[in-house]
Image (cartoon, rainbow, N blue to C red):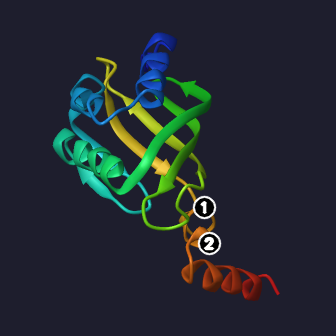
Amino acid sequence: MMQITSQTTLDRVATYFETLTPQSVADLENFYDANARFKDPFNQVQGVAAIRHIFEHMFVALEAPRFVITGQVAQGRQCFMTWEFRFRFKRFLRGKEQTILGTSHLVFSEQGLITLHRDYWDAAEELYEKLPVVGGLMRWLKKRANS
């Protein structure tokens, strides 16, 4: 029978993501298995160093990025967390906070470390439509597809 991931483990992971800072990215190995896999609409990597690079880049590329965990559903050693990713672009739409809605599928090892982290969110609706020039094109394409 598959061991159940404890609520303590899920709360620990949720708190880590909600309080993530450029400094705490260094603590990733306390949450991820050494060979963990990560995938989102822009990245597909394996290993803690590669995953750390993605989160480090997030703090370089965006202003004030942060996650707000809005829900958790766990079954066995896997969990889905719904979240809001809030940030400001450094170059576009300066000063206006953006929000991306998404979910993460997490699979945990018997030791309570993340072995798979897959983020699901709509890059077209949540990101591209908000950008100057590209946004207008994306909204036009969406309108054409729906007509």
Question: Of 116 and 130, which appears nearest the observer?
Answer: 130
Which percent across, then down, holds residue 60? 30, 52
Circle 2 — which element?
helix
Residue at horizontal 40%, vertical 53%?
Answer: 62
| Residue 141 position by quadrant | bottom right
Looking at the image, residue 84 lies above or below residue 113: below
Looking at the image, residue 37 lies above or below residue 145: above
Instruction: Please state, as top left, top right, bottom left or bottom right, where the C terminus lies in the image.
Output: bottom right
Left/right of residue 48 with respect to residue 130 in the rendered view = left
Mark 2 neighbour class, 10 Å CA radius: few under 14, some 14 to 19, many 20 or more:
some
Residue at horizontal 35%, vertical 50%?
Answer: 58
Label drawn at residue 129 = 2
Left/right of residue 76 with respect to residue 111 in the rendered view = right
Which percent across, then down, holds residue 40? 42, 55
Amino acid type of disc 2? Glu
Residue at horizontal 57%, vertical 31%?
Answer: 69
Q: CA distance from mark 2 to mark 1?
A: 7 Å
Which percent across, then down, holds residue 59? 34, 47
Instruction: Please state, as top left, top right, bottom left or bottom right, where the N terminus lies in the image.
Output: top left
Looking at the image, residue 90 lies above or below residue 22: below
| Residue 109 position by quadrant | top left
Mark 1 neighbour class, 10 Å CA radius: few under 14, some 14 to 19, many 20 or more:
some
Label drawn at residue 126 = 1
Left/right of residue 37 with respect to residue 123 in the rendered view = left
Residue at horizontal 43%, vertical 50%?
Answer: 63
Which percent across, then down, holds residue 55? 31, 45
Amino acid type of disc 1? Glu
Task: Please report contact status of discs 2 and 1: CB closer than 8 Å, yes or no.
Answer: yes
Question: Of 21 and 118, which appears nearest the observer?
Answer: 21
Circle 1 — which element?
helix
Q: Residue furthest front?
A: 95
